Amino acid sequence: EAQVTQNPRYLITVTGKKLTVTCSQNMNHEYMSWYRQDPGLGLRQIYYSMNVEVTDKGDVPEGYKVSRKEKRNFPLILESPSPNQTSLYFCASSRGFVDTDTQYFGPGTRLTVL
Amino acid sequence: AQSVSQHNHHVILSEAASLELGCNYSYGGTVNLFWYVQYPGQHLQLLLKYFSGDPLVKGIKGFEAEFIKSKFSFNLRKPSVQWSDTAEYFCAVMGDTGRRALTFGSGTRLQVQP
């Protein structure tokens, strides 16, 4: 089944403890992206990647890092999480970087930073 | 910068009622427009999308949306809702920035009562 998977789905952590949220897609998609969803703000893009080893900042990149060493994986790294990074995170992927390509979303990761 | 406004935050309808959810966007260039749906406990799914051509777009599950360029609007409609349409609906815009970033509205929670 074609899908985008994220792990973990739920995570509670403490301020300053490094964490990684994994994202994987099995559709051989070139484009991948991370979003965060906050009440009243909708989804906002954090980082995106056009292909392996090609990543760039989205609208809200502060406090996050990403890497794209393999086509299928696009982990989101929080080196020193803070409470304002408590949010619902979504990974998305699409076939290419043509605007007409549909973006497929993962199930979301709910992160709480205490 | 692009932005999206969804004015209806919570809509309650009875089954068989007609639905119209408002979406207005702000962006100075060419836009692509989307409606996504998030059913309870599930990930975001694409309902429909507009890139060019006929401004009346038909999507899955009987939904349609009309792009009115002069009003910067992309309202979602369905003539007769069902209980299974209970979900959160997000309007999104993608500008011609090259980042393929989707900017989402804050969402409309639709509750359909049997």
Image: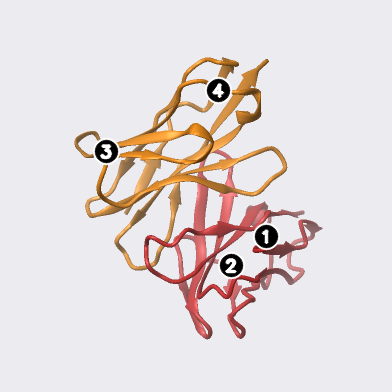
Chain colours: A red, B orange
Q: Residue at x 65, y 71 (%)?
A: A26
In the picture of the structure, the residue carrying the numbered disc 4 is B81
Q: Nearer the viewer, mark 2 or mark 4?
A: 4
Q: Where does the N terminus of chain B fall, quadrant-wise?
A: bottom left
Which numbered mark, 2 or 3, is in the foreground of this view?
3
Q: Judge by depth and name the residue closer to the eye, A71 or A7.
A: A71
In the picture, the disc for residue B72 is: 3
Looking at the rendered structure, the kind of residue marked 1 is: Ser
Ranked by sequence position, the earlier of labels 1 and 2 is: 2
Which residue is denoted by mark 2 in the rendering? A63
Instruction: Judge if badges 2 and 3 mark residues of a common chain.
Output: no
State which chain disc 1 sits on. A
Chain holding disc 3: B
Residue assigned mark 1:
A82
Asked which quadrant contains residue A58, the reply is bottom left
Disc 2 and disc 3: Cα gap in Å?
Answer: 34 Å
Q: Is residue B14 above or below residue B56?
A: above
